[in-house]
Image (cartoon, rainbow, N blue to C red):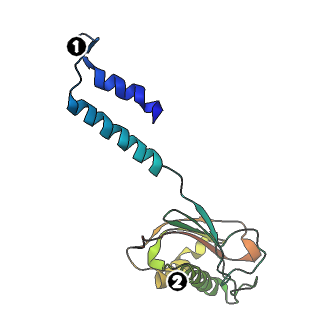
Amino acid sequence: MSRFWPIIATMSQFAPDGQGKGCRVPEAPWRRARSLVFVLLIAATTAAAEPPAVEHLDSGKVLPAGLPFSEAVRTGDLLHLSGQIGIRPGTRELVPGGLEAESRQTLENIRTTLEAHGLSLRDVVKCTIMLADMTQWGRFNAIYREFFAPPYPARSAFGTNGLALGAQVEVECLARVPPRF
């Protein structure tokens, strides 16, 4: 708060005189009140600007133990999900059946992860889609629409030249954690 005091003192003691110079103005009670309100607003804003705590989450319901990343990380009201691929929960084995089966399993894994942390697919605000073959975009979208309904989350996609375990699709999501009362 002391770093703002010179600014407040300057604001309450001087006013423009029309010629670019300051002149001394008698301090009125309302000026002190205004200065006090200003100081309190700055103090409240500074206190509220503290970064939110970072919480690393692992439900154990999808990813196998021992991986070098968290299933999800919560910062404030956002939940960042690590990219998911179409593995059978608890294993490092992709489901058989190609892009459609992997896409369904990937999105089921995301649903399971969200539910393990008290959220749902309706809380997802952004998805990033990674496809091993961008010509499969239409096939992926058909599966995606089975899990997400309008209004859809924001989304971006790109093709890759390789995904973990030889997967054909990976999806990473960002979800909003609703306030709890």
Instruction: From the image, state whether disc 2 or disc 1 is nearer to you.
Output: 1
Q: Which residue is mark 2?
A: 143
Q: Is residue 138 above or below residue 105?
A: above
Q: Nearer the viewer, residue 54 or 140?
A: 54
Which quadrant: the N terminus? top left
Instruction: Measuring from the top left, give residue 15's x and y in whole percent.
Output: 25, 19
Q: Nearer the viewer, residue 127 or 100?
A: 127
Q: Answer with mark 2 or mark 1, whichever residue precedes in sequence.
A: 1
Left or right of residue 119, residue 151 in this image = left
Tell me the residue at 67%/85% (across/down): 98
Classify residue 131 by image quadrant.
Answer: bottom right
Q: Which residue is mark 1?
A: 17
Left or right of residue 124, residue 161 in this image = right
Left or right of residue 39, residue 22 in this image = left
The three-letter amino acid code for the residue at tag 1 is Asp
Instruction: Measuring from the top left, give residue 13's x and y in whole percent.
Output: 29, 21
Classify residue 180 by image quadrant.
Answer: bottom left
